Image (cartoon, grey):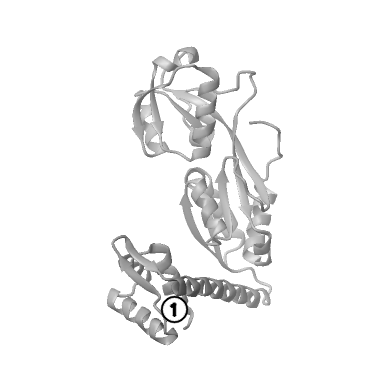
Amino acid sequence: MDEKDWIILKTIYEDRNITKASERLYISQPSLTYRIKQLEKEFGVKILSRGKKGVEFTEHGEYLVQYASNMLSLLERIKEQLSNMNDKVKGTLKLAASRIYARYELPGILSLFLKRYPDIDIQLKTGFSSEVYQMLHKEEVHVGIVRGNHDWDGPKILISEEKIYVVSKYRIDLSNLPAIPRVNYTTDPSLKSIIDSWWKEIFDIPPNITMEVDLIDTCREMVIHGLGYAILPGICLKGLDNLYKYEITSKDGSPIYRRTWLIFRNSTLDLSKVSAFVDFVQTNYKQPAREHN
């Protein structure tokens, strides 16, 4: 059993599907199936079985997957330590980021970071903040960028915060919002919770949602074309000076902010690529913490 086998087991475990795993690994299905059978023969145990919903790992298979994951992590650390002996920061930084932050802010950050550290490769995954947390918990990535307030028991750095606005192509009276068509969008549970809580605090009737879209960018385009108003974080409103923007506040007038955090585990700071990225972000983007929603 070697590094290729570790990667095969880990990939199949993540996908729970031989076809998808073979596509990701650029290995034919028969070759992948053959290698699993060879591993089963080598260890004398059943590793996985096929079901209607894909493949299922046996207890022995689960044990081998954990072993494979541990060995891959150990191998990465060994490579990193050997690299550090050359006093040169290099390697692959595995980063996961909120999709909205990755869309509007991250490209500029990564561009500047890679100019300073050209020997670092970036492996990026994006998703909702809740998905980024899962990637970090499973140690699939070194560093995460998440939005909203979540429970994280490791270190975190506040890197940005913006206000949230009611946005419309036309001038509107906020007191009449329940009667005005609203464009809604699929978003992270933390932002949805902020918006829903604000609405319930201010109004005693539900919003008049006439459009439901899957992306915040689609929602923004609908607003730009005058098809309704939306409640959007400031991050996606740059350059839209022709829209009317109304800051949402609590009943007592206190501002409501959307925060973005850099989160990581202390143990990964031993990796020079991780410590370099954390130091770069902390130096250039860290925000002072304030008491607010």
Q: Is residue 51 visible?
A: yes
User: Viewed as shown, does residue 176 lie left or right of 222?
Assistant: right
User: Viewed as shown, does residue 164 lie left or right of 252?
Assistant: left
Residue at 50%, 28% in the rendered image: 196
Which x, y percent locates residue 161? 61, 37
Nearest to the observer: residue 102 or residue 208:
208
Identified by mark 1, the residue type is Asp
User: Viewed as shown, does residue 265 lie left or right of 195?
Assistant: right
Nearest to the observer: residue 134 or residue 85:
134
Q: Relative to residue 153, is residue 73 depicted above or below?
A: below
Res. 84 image quadrant:
bottom right
Which x, y percent locates residue 197? 54, 27
Nearest to the observer: residue 133 or residue 225:
133
The residue at which mark 1 appears reads as: 5
Residue at 62%, 49% in the rendered image: 262
Q: Relative to residue 184, is residue 160 depicted above or below?
A: below
For disc 1, the neighbor class at 10 Å (few under 14, some 14 to 19, many from 20) is: some
Q: Relative to residue 236, is residue 118 depicted above or below?
A: below
Q: Is residue 246 visible?
A: no
Residue at 65%, 71% in the rendered image: 88
Res. 224 image quadrant:
top left
Which x, y percent locates residue 271? 65, 67
User: Viewed as shown, does residue 285 lie left or right of 219?
Assistant: right
Q: Relative to residue 214, is residue 97 depicted above or below?
A: below
Residue at 56%, 72% in the rendered image: 70
Give the total number of marks visible in the rendering. 1
Which x, y percent locates residue 260? 59, 42
SS of the residue under disc 1: helix
